[in-house]
Amino acid sequence: MGAVRVVQLAVLAWLASAIASHEDSVQYLVTAPQKPELQIGTNFTATCFIKNTTEVTADDLRWKYAKGEIPPEQYTKISETALNVTITVTNETSRWLFCFIPKNSEHVKIDRWKYYHGINLKKGYLPKKPENLTCKAVQYKMSISQFLHCEWEPKHQQPGDFSTFYKLNVHVLNTEKVFNKTTTESSADIDTETFPSFMTLEIWVEAENALGKVESEHLRMEANSFIKTDPPSNINIISEDSFPTSLLLNWTRPIDKTHVYLIYEIRFAPNGSHTWSHVPQADTNIDIQSFRLQNLQPNTVYITQVRCKNERDGYWSEWSNNSTKRTPSSKPASKPDVWLWHISESADEEQVWLFSKEPEFANGEIIEYQISIQDSKEKLPNKNMWEKIRVTNPNADSSTKHATSLKEIDLREKRSHIVKVTAVNVKGTSPVATIVIPEKENVPPPVQKLEVYPDAGKLCVEWTSPNSTAVSEYVVQWTRAGKMNWQREKKGIRKTSVRGNLEEFVRYNVSVYPLYSGWIGKPLHVETYFEQGAPIKGPSVKLNGKPGSTEVHLVWEEIPLNEQRGFISNYTIFYSDGTKTEAITVSRDTLSYTLKPLTRNTRYDTWIRVSNVKGFADGHNHTFTTVKYAPGEIEGIVVGVSLCFLFVVVLTMLICICKRDVIKESFWPQIPNPGASTIGTWSPDYHIKAETSSENCLSGISVLDVDICDGKSVFEEDKACLPLKKDKYMSEEHSSGIGGSSCMSSPRQSVSDSDEGGDIADTTASTVQYSSVVASSGYKGQTPSLPSQQAVFSRSESTQPLLESEENPDMLSLEGSRQSQRFPPESLSHCEGNSDNPNQVEIEAKTLDFCPVGDDSEDRQSDDAQSHEWSTTAPISSYMPQLGGYRPQ
């Protein structure tokens, strides 16, 4: 701290002298030091001086960064005119540090920039020590280049305001030669004038910037250790027929021995393989120019490369260009891979295709296969006869084995078959491959719990071994439309991946067969996809039959397998009537569906969507229109209505038959016979009582009240139904004018006219006079209450026409005979006996209600239709027909 204090005082003295010599300066503040070079992470102290003014003191000074004012705790007051500040330099520290006086007086406000001064700070890091120094001298033509290329770390400049410079130094020991070169990069090429082969070199790098300098470790090695030559050239491979498992290599040195002693490295691999085999280094650790590769596969193309380097330390050259050669052929050293593909099966026999792959060590081009098929029960006549099958497309490359279809075999159900196959090339025949196809009843058990799934770009197959220890190996088979392939796995394997070119969006049928010492066991199958995708298109829907009124039956076919591109999960049926769309989801095994209920006479659009785990596709639309009436519905309605109508008709006829009497009375009522009436026996002197008409009586009928014979009362039943209406008609005795009657009926309104408002303008001119009659007895056997006397009825005035008895007096005798049939003889005799009775009175015409009594219903019905006015002098046979509406015949 004492040294720092001395420096500060010296600076202050220098500033004081500078101020004295520049009294004319207008700047009031000065900062020191100017443009300092600072290391990031260290502390820095700056000083601010006041000059040429006494307006302010050190107490008025302040320090700040661009971001803000520095707290006063970091200030140190040196004197009344000097103030220090101490800060820590970081990456975030601003490049400018300012000293200033706040605006606390008018003088400062006016001369603001005179009280403001700053320091430009330069900051950075010390240079980093160079590491991992490497140098290399490459071959130039047939010698070593004179330029030595060296590299080191760090590869990039450090952050900060300082640039780092590197100096590469090369010293040839035991000489005075020193070569160097300066650069700002992390590599450099240094010129050695002539490369110092077999001499020792010392190499190092110096890094320097404004803050300091640092050196790398010194590298001391022989100059040849830095050499990297070109690879060997003119690689020549010789194939010798007598040595089918070896190849002879020759090459040329890239550089003369006077410059460097070389060692070599050789690698080789079958064509198409990605794995290299290396010749042991001990076999090539000498300066040689040829080598024989051994233990190779016959008839196999090999790729060979060679490289070299200094015999001690040094850099390996690049690998030489590929050199290829096929080894000589030899007879097959392994069995062919034989397998069967089951193509069809029936109750009696089974058809299979026999396939074979080239032996693993075919050692040459397979030109034919020899096949022998032996039945276990029926020996072939020439069992040693082998069938020869030529190979049309031979494949000599052992790295790309392919299956060859040999023959179709028909297998009998209850026989096992032994199939033997050998492969033949130009050098000889392979060992025999044998498989046994057992009869169906004795097929060994299958594997258990087979699973197939894609994983990490491969199709994995996993299974559980059967409950048997006799399994010798497994065969994994995968098939697609018209193609089949297989691979063999050892008996200890339980999980493998399919080794073959699998296609996306293609369904494979993967099977695992256990083999029991050549006997083929029962397979287990699983369908799978290596990669699934959305279906290409949906199924086409159509109608099964014609549309109904409220339902329609849809059918569709499963889309082709190559268009499914995955396992179908479900179908969705869409149908729309133009206003709304409905959807129904059905299972994947459903290929038909009945839509209901639908609206009658409506047009619908329908389509099918097929879905899987990757997406869906819609099929084409199909349009249909529902009918207004379902088939048979109109016929049913017609038949129903016809049956109902027939039922009604039959029922009506039955009712008419059962109720014929009632119908007859309603439409054709029976008219009473006036000739059978006893009104002719009524006495005009009969005392008539007015009685109230019954509820079911017919009003408006004029009835005569008579006293018959001795004035006995009329029968009670007639009196109850025939009340007199004396209040309505005030009659007097009149002369009929017929038969010498002394009374005439005066004109009066009829009952029908008075009750129904008929025309009352009718006069006597339109009336008809009835003759008077004498009643001999009571009506229907009634005994008149008055003494027996002759009943004389006055002739009445009526608009009704005369009875036939009035027009034809000769009919009276016939009417009398009819009347005698109705009334008992004693009544007639009684009346006749009193015919001269002086007390006989003439009956006035009265207005009566005529009601049906007893068996006279037909007479009552006819009497309801019309009303009459009666005269007391009219004979009974003359007026009764007027009540009934017809004349007796």
Image (cartoon, rainbow, N blue to C red):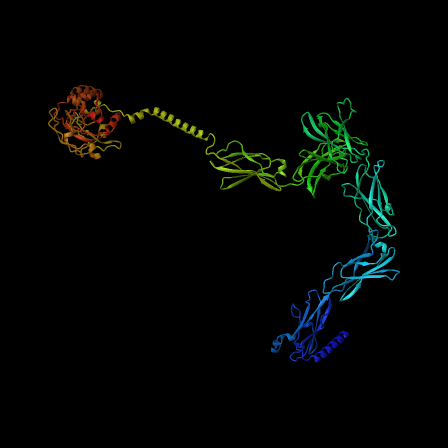
Please indicate whether residue 539 sits to the left or right of residue 173 in the image.
left
Res 837 quadrant in image: top left
Q: Position of residue 116 (x, y in %)?
A: 65, 74
Vertical side of 404 occupied by 130: above or below: below
Q: Nearer the viewer, residue 457 or 572?
A: 457
In this view of the protein, can residue 430 be seen by the observer? no
Quadrant of residue 687 in the image? top left
Q: Along the line of sight, which residue is nearer the eye, 579 or 191?
A: 191
Q: Quadrant location of the C terminus? A: top left
Q: x and y percent of residue 842 in the render? A: 14, 27
Image-based side of 830 in relation to 525, left or right: left
Residue 739 visible in image: yes
From what the image shows, is residue 239 above or below residue 712? below
Q: Is residue 728 left or right of residue 375?
A: left
Left or right? Give the position of 587 relative to 415.
left
The one nearer the camera, 790 or 567, is: 567
Quadrant assignment for the N terminus: bottom right
Which residue is at a point 72% across and 70% down the rendered structure image? 36
